[in-house]
């Protein structure tokens, strides 16, 4: 985004209330995800990486996520 202030002769289009609420909800979820990631990174910086035995292989995480996405997608006839 630009560091310059918006000019006064440029009118901004206002969002519908439902759209504005959706944008705020997305921003809140994005902020929450960023906070969780930051907490994990701070823990790793303070305590080091967890033992491999305590970690879930990425392949298992991928399959779990793909299954979740499949359940969310409506069936195609």
Image (spheres, helix red, strand yellow):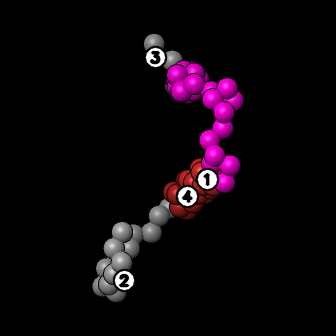
Q: Nearer the viewer, mark 3 or mark 2?
A: 2
Q: Earlier in the sequence, mark 1 or mark 3?
A: 1
Please give the residue where the numbered disc 2 appears in the rendered image.
Answer: 5
**Does residue 3 lie above or below 36 as drawn?**
below
Q: Nearer the viewer, mark 4 or mark 3?
A: 4
- Quadrant in the picture for the C terminus: top left
Please give the residue where the numbered disc 1 appears in the rendered image.
Answer: 45
Q: Nearer the viewer, mark 1 or mark 4?
A: 1
Q: Are marks 1 and 2 in contact (CB under 8 Å)?
A: no
Q: Earlier in the sequence, mark 4 or mark 2?
A: 2
Few, some or many residues within 10 Å of mark 2 (<14, 14–19, 20+): few
Q: Nearer the viewer, residue 53 or 66?
A: 53
Few, some or many residues within 10 Å of mark 4 (<14, 14–19, 20+): few
Residue that protrudes farthest toward the bottom in the picture: 8
Q: How far separated are the C-alphas under marks 1 and 3?
A: 46 Å
Q: How far separated are the C-alphas under marks 4 and 2?
A: 22 Å
Q: Earlier in the sequence, mark 1 or mark 4?
A: 4
**Residue 13 in sight here:** yes
Q: Quadrant of residue 2?
A: bottom left
Residue at the spot 69% in from the left edge and 29% down from the top edge: 54
Please give the residue where the numbered disc 3 appears in the rendered image.
Answer: 76
Q: How far separated are the C-alphas under marks 1 and 4?
A: 27 Å
Helix, strand or loop for disc 3:
loop
Helix, strand or loop for disc 2:
loop
Q: Are marks 1 and 4 in contact (CB under 8 Å)?
A: no
Q: Nearer the viewer, residue 22 or 3?
A: 3
> Taking 22 as reference, is 10 left or right?
left
């Amino acid at each position: 985004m630009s560091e310059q202030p918006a000019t006064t002769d440029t009118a901004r289009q206002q969002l519908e209330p439902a759209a504005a609420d959706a944008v705020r909800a997305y921003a809140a979820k994005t902020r929450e995800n960023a906070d969780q990631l930051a907490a994990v990174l701070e823990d790793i910086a303070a305590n080091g990486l967890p033992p491999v035995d305590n970690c879930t292989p990425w392949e298992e995480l991928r399959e779990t996520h793909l299954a979740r996405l499949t359940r969310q997608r409506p069936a195609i006839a």
